[in-house]
Amino acid sequence: MTSERLILAGAVAQRANVGGHTWVFLQYLLGLRALGWDVMLVDRLTADEPAASSRYLVDVMERFGLGDSFTVLLDDGATAGRSREEALEHARTSAALINVMGYLDDEDILAAAPKRVFLDIDPGFGQMWRALGQADPFAGHDEFVTVGENVGRGDCTVPTCGIDWITTPQPVVLNEWPVADGAGEAFTSVGAWRGPYGPIEYEGRTYGLRVHEFRRFLELPRRTGRRFEVALDIHAAEHEDLTRLHESGWTLADPGVVAATPQAYRDYIRGSSAELMVAKHIYVATRSGWFSDRSICYLASGRPVLAQDTGIRERYPVGEGLLAFSDLDEAQAGVEEIASHPERHRRAAREIAEDRFASDVVLPRLLEKLGLG
């Protein structure tokens, strides 16, 4: 009989005050709990990382009723939340340990779990690192899941590394993301200009970051006359790009203010009129089928999404609530379509979230694919 326990391992405390990243984990934790699973988050920090990082996680978990469902492992042997011994016992009695991006490297806890699942939320990077012999984040795992829903298909150039990948969309807990009132004021988004990884050279091609795609669409505010705002994590030294953003009509918000906590992030999304989602170049160029966890939150909130095509046109109902674009002309047309028929697109956005991304739809399917039933 399958255990009703699971472990979810990943970096939340280490990325304190990044509300959108925290929501990636909350969707799984809250969604699995609603399905009846006793799920525990295992995180880790080094002793020299600020104590505020651990406090951030404690505050988040308590606020969402998960105060008894986590531990933070410190490299000096201390913990925050549940003890290391309790984490080991939870692993031993679990159905599986889901290791997001292979973040957890505690050999004892990994060995205690009967099944170790690698959950890839950044498709392309890990696969290319392994194919190039630069790193092997997949080692020591038994099952492999990716949110790149086209990985393994002939039209997707993300290398499989000989792995039979299980694909899944990312989930959203709908009762945490009710339909927002009002129309909102601007097309918005939240993201990093560059992010933690650099470009990758693979098989004669350079696979880049969001910056390399965003520059293609800088003229969108000027072309449409609409208001665009992005909570952008961009370094102050990016003088040329910052100047071009401002001159092209973009308003920049500080993600450390408007999206620092899960609550602030949710409020920011719900106060928008729609999302303009520009993807990382690697997601677009590989035709990975990646779709943003952030965009799913917009949809659930009844906020339409105009998404750069990463191979999603064949995956999802595109046209109402969710629109796709590949070039500046298509993006401009999508903006005008959403702005011209806002109510229709808001209704359709929520319907897509309910049908395709709701946690009580996505997670049972994923668990079944993993043999957890």
Image (spheres, rainbow, N blue to C red):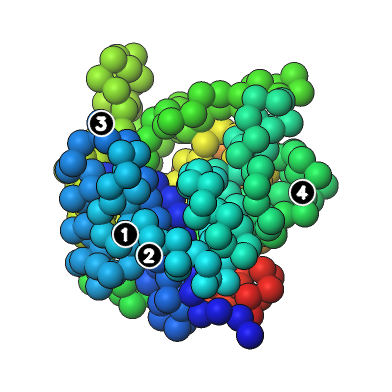
Q: Nearer the viewer, mark 1 or mark 3?
A: 1
- Residue sitting nearer the eye, 363 or 266: 363
Residues at badges 1 and 2 in contact (C-beta under 8 Å)? yes
The tag earlier along the polypeptide, 4 or 2, is 2
Residue at the spot 31% in from the left edge and 72% down from the top edge = 176
Would residue 40 be visible to someone looking at this image? yes
Kind of residue indicated by mark 1 = Ser
Secondary structure at numbered mark 4: loop
Residue highlighted by disc 3: 48
The tag earlier along the polypeptide, 2 or 3, is 3
Q: Nearer the viewer, mark 2 or mark 3?
A: 2
Q: Nearer the viewer, mark 1 or mark 4?
A: 1
Q: Nearer the viewer, mark 4 or mark 2?
A: 2
Residue highlighted by disc 1: 83
Question: Residue 47: x and y, percent?
Answer: 27, 35
Residue at the spot 61% in from the left edge and 81% down from the top edge = 2
Kind of residue indicated by mark 3 = Asp
Residue highlighted by disc 2: 86
CA separation in Å, label 4 and label 2 = 32 Å
Disc 2 packing (10 Å; few <14; some 14–19; many ≥20): few
Quadrant location, the C terminus: bottom right
Question: Residue 23: x and y, percent?
Answer: 35, 58
Mark sitting on residue 289: none
- Residue sitting nearer the eye, 346 or 225: 346
Q: In this image, 344 relative to 318: left or right?
A: left
Residues at badges 1 and 3 in contact (C-beta under 8 Å)? no
Residues at badges 4 and 3 in contact (C-beta under 8 Å)? no
Residues at badges 1 and 4 in contact (C-beta under 8 Å)? no
Would residue 313 be visible to someone looking at this image? no
Residue highlighted by disc 4: 163
- Residue sitting nearer the eye, 170 or 189: 170
